[in-house]
Image (tube, helix red, strand yellow):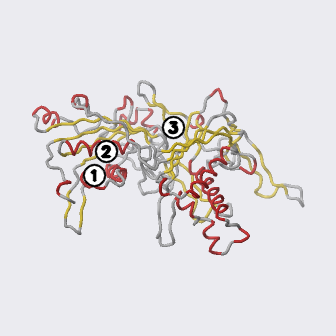
């Protein structure tokens, strides 16, 4: 790294306090399992979820994208070729859960967590079920798993500090804050299947260590996130308007269900003795006085993006094969491989797991967002129990194990808005993008139903596709 790209001195400190609110469920995995789920989230000393500083640092470095010069200058680097490098000038705290009044819960506070209804509710998190469907329409081997997620609406707070020179440091710090505001910024795992979208609020200040008063107020700053500090307003730093990245395409599907939809919870409803029910998850709403309140599971409508993603990927492969003239009755063994999971459109848009040795892995270019919203009581969005039975044509009785019931949601007239973001659009071929957009239009015209029981009439929508290129 050229010496001219280093900071000339470190007599200026830039500080920022970041408030994050989950617009979709998020998953901060611990790498461990439990008797309840295959993957549990990270929890702090109070038993509350938190986001490690190392995770935030890595996400911010990745958010800077191709601006490696700024990333190296802020967060350090090591080069074996030039025997050069330096440590990070950026310090990032852990992101702690925010309670009433937007005050973070920092430090050991077991009595507060126990008495607070909202905080105690964070001890019991929703568990999201997943299944990978093969070409035979059933679960693939090792494709059934579940994971614990943090509900929509939960807020976190963290702080970061950059020691740098004046002009260059301020420009780098504002670029970093700008990257956090980008719509493609996601936190945690499952960012390509609907998790991790955040709403970000920022406030920042600039302190000059050559000024005795400013240096003293820096020394007086408490380290705990829940302690007040007057430096934010006194030495506030103006944050400019977000600069949009290039190559971003926003798709908005404004949808209205024709009648029933069934996004299954994957579990039985033992209370009402129903074999198959829709997924319900509690969420958090914030009042005008910044008080968090739980929304009960029964009052929410959930559309998991992972279900939508699978249907769109399958239909995109169909349209891409159609355009290339690849048909089932003409396939050679090599063409069959390219027509399915290794379809060029699918791997380009949705990524690839690579071969058996992991070679060729690549993350997807399409970002989905889960829908978790509160149902309007006036719309009477509710479930309807349907009984099913398969008849033995010889005996006229029910086939053993084929008597079951399900309770899809009747959502006719309820508006559902699905947001899909396509990144790096400049590197995607015209034929691939056309196949993808044909699939999205099929949803809006009722030709591509979503969810479960689609062959029984569930999951049909009508609506409009809106496209915005940035």
Marked residue nearer the N-terminal end (2 or 1): 1
**Quick check: marks 2 and 1 in contact, CB under 8 Å?**
yes
Residue at image position (50%, 68%) is 354
Q: Secondary structure at mark 2?
A: helix
Camera-side residue: 10 or 466?
466
Q: Which mark is residue 171?
A: none
| Mark closer to the observer (2, 3) | 2
Looking at this rendering, what residue extends furthest in the front direction? Answer: 430
**Residue 311, how many percent across, how many down?**
63, 53
Residue pointed to by mark 1: 70
Residue pointed to by mark 2: 175
Residue pointed to by mark 3: 283
Q: Secondary structure at mark 1?
A: helix
Q: Specify whether 31 is left or right of 220.
A: right
**Residue 237, how many percent across, how many down?**
26, 34
Q: Specify whether 408 is left or right of 56.
A: right
**Residue 25, how many percent across, how many down?**
49, 44
Marked residue nearer the N-terminal end (2 or 3): 2
Camera-side residue: 55 or 265?
55
Looking at this rendering, what residue extends furthest in the top direction? Answer: 289
| Mark closer to the observer (1, 3) | 1
- Check the image and report above or below for 344 versus 72: below
Residue at image position (47%, 65%) is 361
Q: Specify whether 295 is left or right of 79.
A: right
């Amino acid at each position: 790294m050229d010496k001219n790209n280093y900071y000339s001195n470190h007599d200026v400190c830039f500080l920022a306090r970041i408030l994050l609110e989950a617009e979709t469920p998020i998953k901060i995995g611990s790498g461990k399992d439990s008797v309840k789920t295959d993957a549990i989230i990270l929890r702090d000393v109070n038993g509350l979820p938190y986001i490690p500083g190392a995770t935030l640092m890595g996400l911010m470095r990745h958010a800077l994208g191709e601006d490696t010069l700024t990333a190296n200058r802020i967060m350090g680097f090591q080069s074996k070729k030039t025997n050069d490098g330096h440590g990070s000038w950026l310090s990032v705290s852990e992101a702690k859960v925010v309670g009433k009044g937007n005050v973070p819960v920092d430090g050991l506070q077991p009595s507060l967590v126990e008495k607070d209804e909202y905080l105690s509710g964070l001890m019991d998190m929703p568990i999201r079920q997943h299944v990978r469907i093969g070409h035979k329409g059933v679960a693939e081997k090792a494709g059934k798993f579940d994971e614990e997620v943090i509900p929509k609406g939960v807020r976190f707070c963290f702080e970061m500090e950059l020691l740098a020179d004046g002009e260059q440091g301020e420009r780098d710090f504002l670029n970093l804050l700008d990257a956090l505001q980008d719509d493609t910024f996601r936190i945690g795992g499952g960012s390509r299947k609907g998790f991790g979208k955040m709403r970000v609020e920022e406030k920042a200040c600039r302190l000059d260590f050559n000024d005795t008063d400013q240096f003293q107020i820096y020394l007086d700053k408490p380290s705990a996130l829940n302690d007040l500090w007057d430096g934010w307003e006194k030495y506030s730093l103006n944050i400019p308007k977000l600069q949009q990245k290039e190559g971003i395409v926003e798709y908005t599907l404004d949808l209205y269900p024709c009648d029933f939809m069934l996004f299954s919870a994957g579990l039985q409803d033992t209370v009402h003795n129903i074999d198959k029910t829709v997924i319900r998850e509690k969420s958090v709403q914030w009042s005008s006085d910044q008080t968090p309140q739980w929304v009960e599971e029964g009052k929410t409508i959930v559309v998991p993006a992972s279900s939508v993603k699978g249907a769109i990927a399958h239909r995109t492969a169909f349209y891409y094969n159609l355009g290339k003239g690849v048909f089932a009755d003409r396939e050679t063994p090599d063409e069959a491989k390219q027509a399915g999971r290794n379809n060029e459109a699918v791997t380009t848009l949705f990524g690839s797991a690579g071969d058996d040795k992991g070679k060729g892995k690549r993350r997807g270019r399409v970002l989905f967002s889960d829908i978790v919203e509160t149902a309007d009581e006036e719309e009477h969005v509710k479930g309807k129990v349907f009984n099913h039975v398969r008849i033995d044509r010889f005996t006229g009785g029910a086939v053993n194990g084929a008597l079951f019931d399900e309770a899809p949601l009747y959502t006719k007239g309820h508006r559902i808005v699905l947001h899909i973001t396509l990144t790096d659009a400049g590197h995607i071929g015209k034929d691939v993008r056309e196949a993808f957009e044909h699939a999205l239009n099929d949803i809006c015209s009722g030709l591509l139903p979503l969810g479960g029981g689609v062959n029984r009439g569930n999951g049909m929508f009508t609506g409009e596709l809106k496209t915005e290129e940035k």
